Amino acid sequence: MIRERYPTLVEDSSQANSAVLILDQTRLPREAVMRRLASLEDAAHAIRVMQVRGAPLIGATAAYGVALGLRDDESDARLAQAIEELSVTRPTAVNLHWALARMRRALQGAALATRREQAWQEARAIAAEDRAANAAIGQHGLSLIAALHADLRSGIACPPAPLFGKGGRERPAEGEPKSYPPSPLSGKGGDDVRQAAPGVVNVMTHCNAGRLATVEHGTALAPVYAAHAAGLPVHVWVSETRPRNQGLLTAWELAEVGVPHTLIVDNAAGLLLMRGMVDLVLVGADRIAANGDVANKVGTYLKALAARAHGVPFYVAAPLSTIDHSCASGAAIPIEERAAEELDAGDVAVSNPAFDLTPAALISGIISERGIAGAGELKQWVP
Ligand code: MRU
């Protein structure tokens, strides 16, 4: 069944520079509802309550929020107030602060008479750049999936990795056996898994870093879409991602284009990695520190640890706007604590951090619109 494709964020074409329409993600996957944002307050609310979510989409929505804020008053005071009101909606996703700083730079020197028009133009440019960056991420990440597919097709089995240390997808050294016994821990892994689905690249992801988290294409899912479009067989293990279940958003959008996927509870990831049923872990990011530490949805760190334990490559996909070069390491990244009610646990003490930190040492590489770099090599991407 061909489903109507709802844009995540689009300008209201019924009246220029008047409003934007968003796909309300609090109603997905049950129903697709487009919501009209016509004021600064609408935009700030949509970010705060996660009608829009995902670092790049939060940034683009905030940029349009500034333009909406200048609707009746283009003064410096109003500009400052709009930026301030949006900047406190969510703390971790650096794209929010990146977009607001860019809007401030673009508008503070602008003549009042043209400031509103310039605000819409700048927000529009931010949205267009997000589309282009994610499309490029898709192509760079495609090379990873294609290489894995080629390995799998040529029967290069994945050696069961020791509990910790090197292993996984490395090519067997000269003289090393070309096929492997099952993992001593799980009795699985080795090359028996491959018989099941020769050549299919099993990608594991966490949260939603797909088109729903961006203006278009997604980040972590962009290589998956590029591979699917190129006819490469991919299958995605989709983590539910408690407590807001962004995994259901990921399943919804993968179904939209027919990418095979399987939903798992978050805690099942370790077993799948141990059993050699995952070839690649691909996640997004909310903020990447200068040293390569990554903040992403809570639960990402546990996947990175398990991936390392079982020698499975762990990549982070994110546009350059998600790299915070002013942030020396993960320790300096503010982690959002969200409401206890999200756990729906009744009268019990709750801690609900929305993000966690994955040290650069556990990351095989970072995929941006500029290519793929080691987590510790981000200086080359300093603007
Ligand atoms: O709380 P959310 O849903 O906004 O968290 C989103 C994530 O953690 C994403 O992985 C990240 O923002 C990257 S989106 C391309």
Image: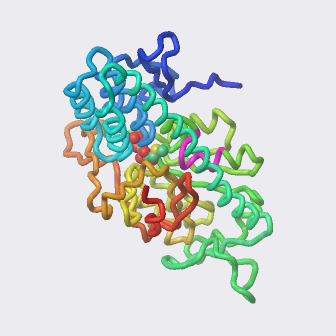
Closer to us: 368 or 67: 67
Question: Within the displayed image, which quadrant is ligand 1 positioned in?
Answer: top left
> Residue 306, percent across and down?
48, 66
Q: Is residue 49 visible in this depiction of the protein?
A: yes
Closer to us: 237 or 144: 144
In the picture provided, is 339 more to the left or to the right than 372? left
* Quarter holding residue 324: bottom left
In the picture provided, is 303 more to the left or to the right than 346? right
Residue plotted at (32% across, 17% down): 71
Q: Quadrant of the C terminus?
A: bottom left
* Quarter holding residue 243: top left
Residue plotted at (31% across, 59% down): 327
Q: Is residue 243 visible in this depiction of the protein?
A: no
Q: Is residue 219 magenta?
A: yes
Residue plotted at (49% across, 51% down): 318
Q: Is residue 2 above or below residue 156?
A: above
Q: Is residue 269 above or below residue 114?
A: below
> Residue 244, percent across and down?
39, 38
> Residue 350, percent across and down?
23, 46
Q: Quadrant of the N terminus?
A: top right
Q: How is the image coloured?
A: rainbow
In the picture provided, is 42 more to the left or to the right than 187? left
> Residue 174, percent across and down?
73, 87
Closer to us: 57 or 210: 57
Q: Is residue 129 magenta?
A: no
Q: Is residue 163 above or below residue 331?
A: below
Closer to us: 25 or 142: 142
Residue plotted at (55% across, 45% down): 133
- What is the magenta range? 217-225
In the picture provided, is 351 more to the left or to the right than 137? left
